[in-house]
Image: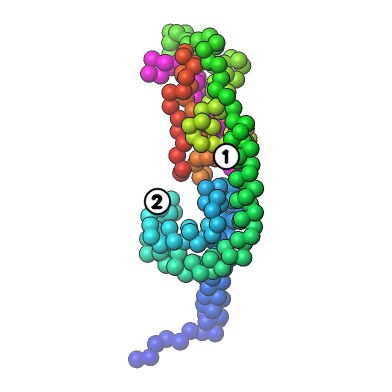
Amino acid sequence: MTAPRLTPMKSAIWTVISFVGILFVGSGCTSFFLHTHSEQFRGSMTRVYPGTCANAELIVNPNIINRDWHTPPPIIVTYGILDFIPSAALDTLLLPVDLATHKTSSAAGNHEAKSSPQKPDTASWPSAARNPSTLEHGKYWTPTIVERARGEQLARWYACRQLALSSGQVSKMKTDCIGWHKNERTELYVRFFDPKAFGANTDFSAIAVDGGFPGYFSVTVDVGSWRVVDHYAERE
């Protein structure tokens, strides 16, 4: 019994599909993606050969990307192996650019480190604690302009000091705030997000998170004692 033969049309279609697949996998797309999305993947772009390193990580630990893309690990490993050499070649071509970018980023980071914000003099700030019985639904409260400014100032200092962000990174972030009474404290929840990648809903119910920290994070301030009590900074 002979196998069924493909018609000329089907044969041409499969040829095109195969060619596109080989072109896609053999184009060093991991390296290309990381280089063209350097702001989103700032951590990967601090070293040379980002595409090569990323493919090696996919081969060794395919579950890293499987959590988000729900792709079977064998397919991820196969992709990493097939794209390893093309991405290494593209990384090599872009090595002078990466070295120059890394040098510039390091110099900028050193300059920003010298100009890191000082801790606010919170001891001179009056307490902004609220009586729960006066709050909306016994929980929510609206900060004044001064209270919001002080909360954001303390949160920005905390982000530079404890979350290892530069003052330049933090200064570019947009913020929104909400006040609530929680754990017997009057808290101000300050959210930071990169306006190029995220957009906060006007009702504060949700935010479009794609990539997580450092593009998005939050800092919780106890306005009764003016101290940071919590933060959220996960890479999603």
What residue sits right under mark 1 in the picture?
198
- Residue 163 vs 33, above or below: the answer is above
Q: Which amino acid does label 2 sit on?
A: Arg
Residue pictured at 39% horizontal, 58% vertical? 62
Foreground residue among 206 and 43: 43
Residue 133 pos. (x, y %):
43, 8
Give the crowd class for mark 2: few <14, some 14-19, many >=20 residues within 10 Å: few
Would residue 195 be visible to someone looking at this image?
A: no
Give the crowd class for mark 1: few <14, some 14-19, many >=20 residues within 10 Å: some
Q: Main secondary structure of the magenta part?
A: strand
Q: Quadrant location of residue 16?
A: bottom right
Residue numbers of the magenta segment: 178-197
Q: What residue type is labelled 1?
A: Phe
- Element under disc 1: loop
Let me know if residue 190 is in the magenta part. yes
Label annotation for residue 177: none
Q: Quadrant location of residue 89?
A: bottom right
